[in-house]
Image: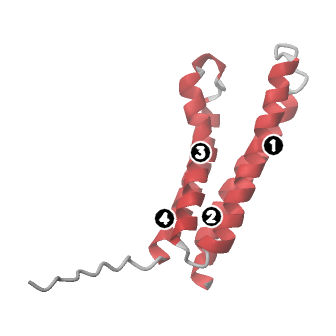
Amino acid sequence: MNRTRRPVSLITISAVVQTLGYLSALPNHIGDPTWSAHAQFHLVLSWIWLVGLNGLILAIVWGPARRGERWALWIALGGYVMAQGGHFVSVLLVWDGRPTETWYHFALAAVALVGLEGFRELWQLFPKSKRTVTSTPS
């Protein structure tokens, strides 16, 4: 399916940029004297989970979703919303702990929107579900 190349690439770019973006933030927080060792542990653990989740999303998108399996698209989209939306939910839940630079939120939103565009384009390639109505004899 060559038509899937662009949407799958958009999703891939988004997942990779998000992962690398969080990786670039790790050194600033690891060793920060205001963060406890336990908080630093959870930061690294969260990044590993994010890498794993994005890896699973990409495996599903490049495999069964690209082959047209609708269930795979739903699973990948659900994981994507959790991975990309986690930042924004965290901001709402831990307001005082959020990054204070406004550009950071806009950058993450832009990255998320790129991937969502990929999911939108991929979804449009799926055939419309066929509904058949059968009448029962009376």
Q: Position of residue 22 (x, y in %)?
A: 76, 40
Residue 124 in view here: yes
| Tag 2 near tag 1, CB within 8 Å | no
Residue identifier under label 1:
48
Q: Disc number at residue 10?
A: 2
In percent of the image, x 57 and y 44: which residue is there? 109
Mark 3 or 4: in front is 3
Q: Earlier in the sequence, mark 4 or mark 2?
A: 2
In percent of the image, x 60 and y 52: which residue is there? 80
Q: Earlier in the sequence, mark 1 or mark 4?
A: 1
Residue 25 in view here: no
Q: Position of residue 104 (x, y in %)?
A: 65, 35
Other residues around mark 2 within 10 Å, as few (<14) / some (14–19) / many (≥20): many
Q: State the CA–CA distance, disc 2 to disc 1.
A: 22 Å
Element under disc 2: helix
- Judge left or right: residue 28 versus residue 106: right
Q: State the CA–CA distance, disc 3 to disc 4.
A: 17 Å
Element under disc 4: helix
In percent of the image, x 59 and y 77: which residue is there? 4
- Give, as a three-letter code, the residue at label 3: Met
Q: Disc number at residue 82?
A: 3
